[in-house]
């Protein structure tokens, strides 16, 4: 497996967009087991963004809730976070 700053990373990643993007959001009771299963399968590169959902509940909020519940997983995951800005 490849290394990134000395940490083994998976060749495939898990995108979080569909869990928080549009319409009805995936409840934590469903999202958390998906994240746990991905990590157990060796998928430790997770992708999120501040625009994957609303300002009040996007994939970054989901990650914060997940790591608050499972702090032991924080050191196992490599986050790939996208962001952007709007010039108004």
Image (cartoon, grey):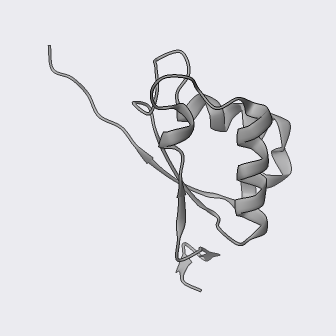
Residue 37, percent from left and from top: 77, 59
**Can you name the residue that lies furthest to the left here?**
88
**Residue 27 in which image quadrant:** top right
Residue 50, percent from left and from top: 44, 31
* Residue at 54% from the left image edge and 45% from the top image edge: 16
Taking 79 as reference, is 32 left or right? Answer: right
**Where the N terminus falls, by quadrant?**
bottom right
Count how many numbered circles sit on residues in the image: 0
* Residue at 78% from the left image edge and 54% from the top image edge: 36
**Residue 76 in which image quadrant:** bottom right
Residue 44, percent from left and from top: 64, 64
Residue 73 vs 52, above or below: the answer is below
**Where the C terminus falls, by quadrant?**
top left
**Can you name the residue that lies furthest to the front here?**
24
Taking 88 as reference, is 18 left or right? Answer: right
* Residue at 46% from the left image edge and 32% from the top image edge: 21
Frontmost residue, 27 versus 76:
27
Frontmost residue, 5 versus 13:
13
Residue 48 vs 85, above or below: the answer is below
* Residue at 53% from the left image edge and 77% from the top image edge: 11
Taking 65 as reference, is 25 left or right? Answer: left
Residue 38 vs 64, above or below: the answer is below
Residue 59, percent from left and from top: 54, 35
Frontmost residue, 88 versus 52:
52
């Amino acid at each position: 497996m490849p290394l990134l700053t000395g940490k083994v990373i998976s060749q495939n990643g898990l995108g979080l967009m569909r869990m928080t993007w549009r319409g009805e959001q995936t409840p934590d009771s469903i999202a958390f087991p998906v994240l746990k299963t991905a990590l157990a399968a060796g998928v430790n590169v997770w992708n999120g963004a501040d625009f994957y959902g609303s300002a009040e509940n996007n994939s970054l909020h989901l990650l914060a809730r997940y790591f608050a519940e499972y702090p032991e997983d924080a050191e196992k995951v490599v986050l790939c976070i996208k962001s952007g800005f709007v010039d108004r």
